[in-house]
Amino acid sequence: MIRSIILSVVFVSFFLPRMLFSQDVILTSQADVDAFDSATTTINGNLNIKGYQSFLDPITNLSNLSNLTTISGYLYIKSNNALNNVDGLSNLAAISGGLYIEYNASLTNVDGLSNLTTISGDLYIFNNDALSNLDGLSNLTTFRWIIYYV
């Protein structure tokens, strides 16, 4: 009995921190994205993917975020001039806050958000010059407002 309790505590201590991130996450370079624990499924906070500070190491690939299913705060994808898509967010299903996608000059689609069904806050898409459609948001069933400017 004691052995199984100890094994349970060790299992939870080892794996839970990798599956749950309990603070805001700020990714400002591809190195930050690559260093993010790819086993994380939930962020209890905001996820900021903001590339405006990374001229030498721009964010180009979000594949390390591929196991992420839930964000309890906001998701900001902002000022990532080398980011063409958000395919690394393909398992994201729910955002408790809002979704803000703005100033991503090379972003051509949001198809990586095709599993997203719920945004409890606003959906704000602004000034993404190469974005040609919003087909990746077709499974979205819940959101408060949508603001879309090309």
Image: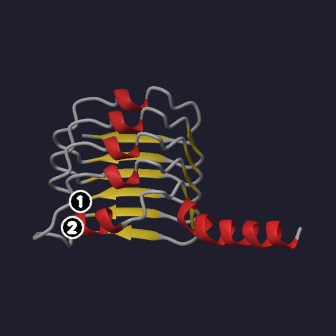
Q: Residue at x 49, y 27 (%)?
A: 139
Quadrant the N terminus occupies: bottom right
Q: Which numbered disc covers residue 79?
A: 1
The image shows a total of numbered marks equal to 2
Q: Is residue 149 above or below residue 20?
A: above
| Residue 74, x across and y down, in percent | 50, 58
Q: Is residue 74 above or below residue 26?
A: above
Structure colour scheme: secondary structure
Near-viewer residue (32 or 147) = 32
Near-viewer residue (27 or 65) = 65
Decide if residue 123 is on the left or right side of residue 29. Answer: right
Q: Tag 1: residue type? A: Ser
Mark 2 highlights which residue? 52
Label pair 1/2, CB-CB below 8 angstroms = yes
Decide if residue 89 is on the left or right side of residue 97. Answer: left
Task: Tell me which numbered mark, 1 or 2, is placed earlier along the sequence.
Answer: 2
The crowd level at tag 2 (other Cα within 10 Å; few <14, some 14-19, many 20+) is: some
Decide if residue 105 is on the left or right side of residue 96. Answer: left
| Residue 53, x across and y down, in percent | 20, 73
Quadrant the C terminus occupies: top left
Q: Residue furthest left?
A: 56
Q: Tag 2: residue type? A: Tyr
Decide if residue 12 is on the left or right side of residue 81. Answer: right
